[in-house]
């Protein structure tokens, strides 16, 4: 019995961490929707990720010393590029899109990220398995069904186009992160990614005319932003990173099709969002395709980040 105790404890921790990733990353879509009620989408994202980077960076400095951030110029710019693609282009455009579409619809369309990653692999002549290709075709069929229908009363063409661009940007960042020079320390890399992504959001927000009026920001939006910083970006990220080293990637990757379900449920319960027949059917097809891709690729170690927040290992 004693010999089995450590194994049982690890198994319990795996499911606790997995539950955190399921719920926390699924809830970030709701958090974003509430934050942007009175905060500009890009500037709220900048506040979120720069604050999270400062907290994570300070922790690393205290825990491991300044040497943890030792990296080459090439590694630094690699992490910065990934941060711009994942966070400014990915997460930032999710926030912009949620001004026009429901959180559930946003989460379902972002779930197409694993499908895009397979497409990019094909582009560099990395031949996936037949079942993986089948999953991609099924998943994109669901994306097309939802997009062409406009998501019923829950979406607009503008919002759908923006969220698909966000998923594409996130996918490019994820794809490149495994193929360019990156800092050796994952947490240091994520700190650089979040700073770069946050600065990119400030620039895009300024160019697009966003202005931060502190007097107009509600307590509800501030609370959502704090939740996104502490729980979405730090707790969820830490749990995900721990899982990568302690659980099979096939199990960890299941967040890709659980998060949208959590997002849809929370959107209905908290924001009273309407779930149309088009979203239900199209979303089901998307998730079937993603599940087929993830299960078929279980022997690989793909870097599939959470749609709505980090990283090769960053969070949504």
Image (spheres, rainbow, N blue to C red):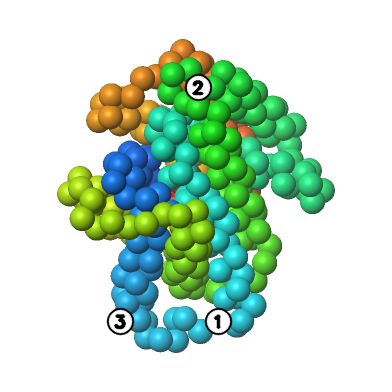
Question: Image height check: is 157 above or below 189?
Answer: above
Please state the horizontal and vertical placement of residue 222, each as a whole percent of the image: 23, 52
Please state the horizontal and vertical placement of residue 48, each as a whole percent of the image: 35, 59
- Which secondary structure, mark 1? loop
Q: Which mark is residue 57?
A: none
Sequence-first disc among 2 and 1: 1
- Residue at image mark 3: 62
Residue 217 falls left or right of residue 129: left
- Residue at image mark 2: 151
Give the alpha-carbon distance from disc 2 to disc 1, as whole Å: 45 Å
Residue 129 seen in this snapshot: yes
Please state the horizontal and vertical placement of residue 54, each as a whole percent of the image: 34, 72
Give the alpha-carbon distance from disc 3 to disc 2, as whole Å: 48 Å
- Residue at image mark 1: 71
The answer to the question of whether label 2 and label 1 lie on touching residues, with beta carbons closer than 8 A, is no
Q: Residues within 10 Å of mark 2 (few under 14, many from 20)?
A: many
Q: Indicate the quadrant where residue 32 lies.
A: top left
Sequence-first disc among 1 and 3: 3
How many badges with numbers are in the image? Answer: 3
């Amino acid at each position: 019995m004693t010999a089995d105790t450590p194994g049982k404890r690890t198994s319990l921790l795996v499911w606790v961490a997995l539950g955190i990733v399921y719920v926390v990353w699924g809830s970030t879509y709701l958090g974003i929707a509430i934050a942007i009620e009175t905060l500009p989408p890009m500037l709220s994202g900048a506040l979120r990720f720069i604050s999270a980077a400062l907290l994570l960076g300070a922790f690393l400095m205290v825990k491991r010393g300044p040497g943890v951030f030792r990296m080459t110029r090439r590694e630094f710019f690699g992490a910065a590029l990934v941060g711009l693609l994942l966070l400014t282009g990915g997460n930032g455009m999710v926030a912009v899109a949620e001004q026009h579409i429901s959180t559930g619809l946003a989460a379902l369309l972002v779930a197409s990220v694993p499908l895009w990653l397979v497409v990019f692999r094909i582009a560099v002549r990395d031949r996936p398995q037949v079942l993986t290709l089948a999953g991609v075709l099924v998943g994109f069929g669901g994306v097309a069904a939802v997009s062409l229908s406009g998501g019923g009363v829950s979406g607009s063409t503008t919002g759908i186009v923006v969220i698909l661009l966000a998923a594409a940007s996130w996918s490019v960042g994820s794809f490149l992160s495994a193929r360019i020079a990156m800092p050796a320390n994952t947490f240091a890399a994520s700190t650089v990614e979040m700073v770069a992504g946050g600065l990119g959001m400030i620039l895009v927000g300024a160019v697009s005319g966003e202005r931060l009026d502190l007097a107009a920001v509600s307590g509800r939006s501030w609370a959502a932003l704090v939740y996104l910083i502490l729980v979405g970006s730090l707790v969820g990220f830490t749990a995900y990173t721990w899982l990568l080293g302690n659980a099979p990637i096939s199990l960890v990757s299941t967040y890709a099709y659980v998060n949208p379900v959590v997002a849809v449920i929370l959107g209905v319960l908290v924001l009273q969002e309407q779930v149309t027949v088009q979203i239900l059917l199209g979303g089901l097809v998307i998730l079937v395709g993603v599940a087929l891709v993830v299960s078929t690729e279980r022997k690989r170690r793909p870097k599939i980040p959470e749609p709505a927040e980090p990283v090769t290992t960053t969070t949504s």
